[in-house]
Image (cartoon, rainbow, N blue to C red):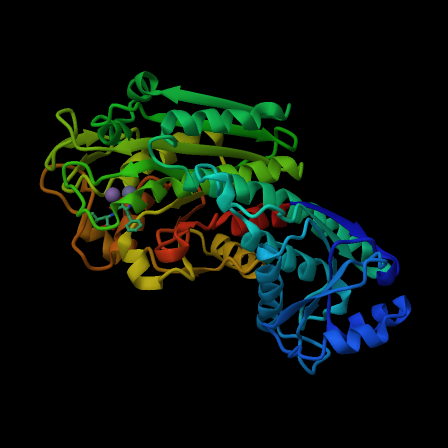
């Protein structure tokens, strides 16, 4: 969707659909000389958060329709009610044949939000709701008119803040869509090679360099843990590197690391068949870091960023890793692989070690790492683990700001003993208990030389059930975190 900002009188807007509160609608209608018409057609509208109704105006009107957004009897909405209001608006826009709309943003006041945050939250919610993945569906299942343009109408005193919010929202929207599309692609299309090709598209900007390292070089580098995962697959693994130079070279980069398992069968420790199709989403961490990178590039943020994607398929085969195999990681530490289904940490640990060479100011990895994280937090919060509490504060605040929240869990040494192995420096799994924490503890052994955070998005990165699909999380959180570094 294409966003723009506008100031000026609402009744002079030329739009398919003006999104307003009832109160603001009345003055628009009055200026248009349509009071009687409005009284009759809005009669049934229940004015409360969560309700929205389209009202067609006479053909002669430059505003073709009003979309009334209920707010109830209040001057100021709570952030929660504001999300309900925008949610109802999005619900109508999704199904109506409307091509362009204007949102009278300053008709809505939200407690604790300035003009910037209000616009950011509204646009994030709308774009989230209006997203559609239709790449492999028959065309008639896609509605004929879909909204493609949204004008954010604001008061002139909010113009600067709203314009900035719209620019940031536009960049985020593109990154989020990129991430969601990657996640939703079927695993026969979205394999490591495909991810590499998609990442290469980011190199259209002159500030960006993309390298795709193939298996031969991954092996030569000494990434034995990474290789142990990709060995069983006929589709070769890739280490994808995107370097974005938005600031002078002396500024250390932020490094983002994504788990890009394009399909996780579990390997020889094969998963049960129920919902195994959802393991195509096991590359959502990779999709999220690539999506964030696209947003940062498009917003031309003055930061340095390196994005590393560990892309591989986890398959059982005659060349696959066996439970009991011992491999040597890039760090030199050896790992006894007791469960080949704990593969995410194996590709990530070598990629974390690889990140060291960038002398990053912080490394944030994103992974659909454990079912245990879903048990602990469900789908609302991503799990946050870190060796740097100041970094935790920043990430939690960024998530709160854009309503893409994370919740911190411990990485205490007490949990490390679960990884003890009789045959190597560590095992790749502990017992069942505290699985998300133990997985983070495993990764922490490869993040000793830098400030590091791990986001377990197994519950938040995609939805199951009737709304099955990628959510693009935590792109909003990560983009906001990078934005806050500027
Ligand atoms: N990709 C899975 C984690 C996962 C599970 C993501 C469910 C989304 C939903 C990961 O590779 C995995 O299989 N983890 C194992 C770890 C275990 C073997 C220690 C798990 O969570 O069961
Ligand atoms: Mn697995
Ligand atoms: Zn996995």
Which residue is at the front of the view, 479 or 108?
A: 108
Image quarter of the N terminus: top right
Identified at 25% across, 45% down, the residue is: 276
347 or 312: nearer the viewer: 312
Q: Judge whether 82 appears above or below 239 on screen.
A: below
Residue drawn at (56%, 49%) of the image: 481
Along the line of sight, the residue nearer the viewer: 275 or 477: 275
Compared to residue 128, the image places residue 197 above or below, namely above
Q: What is the x, y in percent for residue 95?
A: 57, 56
- Which quadrant contains ligand 3? top left
Quarter of the picture containing the C terminus is: top right
For residue 382, what is the image quadrant?
Answer: bottom left
Residue occupying image coordinates x 37% and y 32% = 310
Q: Is residue 443 left or right of residue 148?
A: left
Residue 397 lies, in percent from the top left, at: 55, 59
Q: Is residue 21 visible?
A: yes
């Amino acid at each position: 969707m294409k966003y723009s900002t506008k100031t000026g009188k609402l009744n002079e807007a030329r739009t398919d659909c003006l999104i307003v509160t009832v109160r603001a609608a009345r003055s628009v209608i009055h200026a248009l000389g349509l009071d009687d018409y409005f009284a009759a057609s809005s009669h049934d509208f229940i004015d409360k958060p969560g309700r929205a109704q389209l009202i067609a105006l006479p053909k002669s009107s430059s505003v073709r329709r009003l979309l009334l957004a209920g707010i109830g009897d209040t001057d100021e909405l709570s952030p929660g009610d504001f999300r309900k209001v925008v949610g109802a608006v999005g619900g109508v826009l999704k199904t109506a044949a409307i091509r362009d709309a204007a949102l009278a943003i300053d008709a809505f006041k939200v407690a604790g939000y300035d003009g910037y945050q209000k616009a950011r939250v509204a646009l994030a919610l709308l774009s989230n709701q209006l997203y559609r993945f239709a790449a492999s569906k028959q065309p008639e299942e896609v509605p004929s008119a879909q909204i493609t343009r949204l004008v954010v109408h604001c008061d002139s005193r909010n113009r600067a803040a709203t314009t900035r919010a719209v620019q940031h929202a536009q960049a985020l929207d593109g990154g989020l869509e990129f991430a969601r599309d990657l996640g939703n692609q079927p695993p026969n299309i979205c394999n490591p090679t495909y991810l590499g090709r998609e990442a290469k598209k980011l190199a259209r900007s002159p500030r960006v360099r993309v390298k795709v390292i193939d298996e031969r070089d991954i092996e030569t580098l000494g990434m034995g843990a990474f290789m142990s995962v990709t060995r069983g697959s006929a589709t070769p693994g890739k280490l994808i590197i995107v370097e974005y130079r938005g600031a002078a070279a002396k500024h250390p980069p932020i490094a983002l690391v994504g788990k890009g398992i394009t399909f996780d069968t579990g390997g020889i420790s094969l998963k049960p068949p129920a919902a195994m199709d959802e393991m195509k989403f096991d590359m959502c961490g990779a999709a999220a870091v690539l999506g964030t990178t696209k947003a940062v590039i498009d917003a031309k943020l003055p930061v340095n960023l390196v994005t590393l994607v560990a892309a591989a398929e986890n398959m059982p085969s005659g060349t696959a890793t066996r439970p009991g195999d011992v491999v040597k990681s890039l760090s030199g530490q050896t790992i006894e692989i007791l469960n080949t289904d704990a593969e995410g940490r194996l590709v990530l640990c070598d990629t974390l070690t690889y990140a060291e060479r960038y002398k990053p100011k912080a490394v944030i990895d994103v992974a659909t790492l454990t079912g245990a994280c879903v048990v602990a937090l469900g789908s609302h919060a991503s799990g946050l683990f870190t060796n740097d509490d100041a970094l935790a504060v920043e990430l939690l605040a960024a998530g709160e700001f854009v309503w893409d929240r994370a919740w911190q869990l411990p990485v205490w040494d007490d949990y490390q003993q679960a990884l003890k192995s009789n045959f190597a420096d560590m095992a790749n799994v502990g017992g069942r208990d505290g699985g998300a924490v133990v997985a983070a503890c495993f990764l922490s052994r490869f993040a000793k030389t830098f400030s590091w955070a791990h986001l377990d998005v197994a519950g938040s990165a995609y939805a199951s059930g009737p709304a099955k699909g990628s959510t693009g999380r935590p792109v909003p959180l990560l983009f906001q975190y990078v934005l806050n570094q500027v």
